[in-house]
Amino acid sequence: MTSLNAQTRLGDLIKTQPEAMRYFESVGIDYCCGGHRPLGEACDAVGLDCDSVLKTLGSLPKAAEGSPSPADWEKATLTDLIAHIVPTHHDFLRTELPRLDKLVTKVLEVHGERHPEMERIYDLFQALTADLMPHLMKEEQILYPFIRSMESGQQGGACFGTVQSPIRVMEMEHEAVGAILAELRKLTNSYTAPADGCATFQALYQGLAGLEADIHLHIYLENQILHPRAIAMESSLQG
């Protein structure tokens, strides 16, 4: 493996060291939407010393042998990657968002007076859901079918002309989702329930932390693997 340094792209780093994902989440480094940035730039953005981060990365326990790695999807077909994303991440969101909606509503009702930040947390969660649900449909009904057809050699006409057009829209929407998650992490003190938080409060924050982790990996797989490979495939076919 190439040694890590300040110029290593976050997206490439995750492929070789997937255990870094949770560490990056804990310190606020965006490896999904910001996967194109070098590590040094990402550290500067959140006020971290790059040398210290590199030292921590070098001491992280390695992922268990045989554990799934994002790099594995670079070897799979795009059709197989899509077939993984939909049941693993899209279906998770369709189940988890309604569950968390009930929790955030209850916590706001019971604890909102003592914790006024809950009103903003509630609003952010509603905005997150409003952004994600149509986003999933656009991927499943427009982008994914086009990529599958292109990979199978059945290139039909598309109203958007090139795969880069819907990908650009999807990545802009990913940026919006990433910004909401970043604000949620800040408002919840990195999903640390307050001392007077009840079991529902704790369950909400645990659920939000799990939601963030899943969305980050979801976006990473699309921004850093699916989208670049689809663009490269289209370019190759047109060439």
Image (cartoon, grey):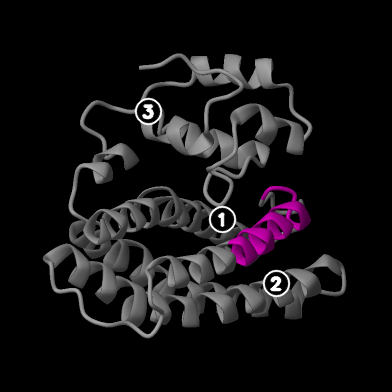
Q: Calculate the distance from the C-alpha at mark 1 to the C-alpha at mark 2.
A: 16 Å
Q: Calculate the distance from the C-alpha at mark 1 to the C-alpha at mark 3.
A: 28 Å
In this view, the mark in front (1 or 3):
3
Q: Is residue 196 left or right of residue 146?
A: right
Residue 43 in the image: state x and y as whole percent.
69, 31
Which span is picked out in magenta? 175-190
User: Disc 1 designates what residue?
Assistant: 206
Q: Residue 51 falls in which quadrant of the image?
A: top right
Q: Residue at x 38, y 51 (%)?
A: 228
Q: Main secondary structure of the magenta part?
A: helix
Residue 118 in the image: state x and y as whole percent.
78, 69
Q: Residue at x 20, y 42 (%)?
A: 75
Amino acid type assigned to the residue bearing label 3 in the image: Thr
Q: Calculate the distance from the C-alpha at mark 2 to the C-alpha at mark 3.
A: 33 Å
Sequence order check: which comes first, mark 1 or mark 2? 2
**Among all residues in the image, which is located at the extreme front?**
239
Q: Split into 4 quadrants, where in the image is the N terminus?
A: top left
Asked if labels 3 and 2 touch by Cβ distance under 8 angstroms, the answer is no
Does residue 142 show up magenta in the picture? Answer: no
Sequence order check: which comes first, mark 1 or mark 3? 3
Work out whether 133 lies above or below 238: below
Q: Secondary structure at mark 3?
A: helix
User: Around disc 1, counting alpha carbons within 10 Å, would you say few (fewer than 14), some (14 to 19), or many (20 or more)?
Assistant: some
User: Disc 3 designates what residue?
Assistant: 16
Q: Residue 24 falls in which quadrant of the image?
A: top right
User: Disc 2 designates what residue?
Assistant: 124
In this view, the mark in front (1 or 2):
2
Amino acid type assigned to the residue bearing label 2 in the image: Leu
Amino acid type assigned to the residue bearing label 1 in the image: Gln
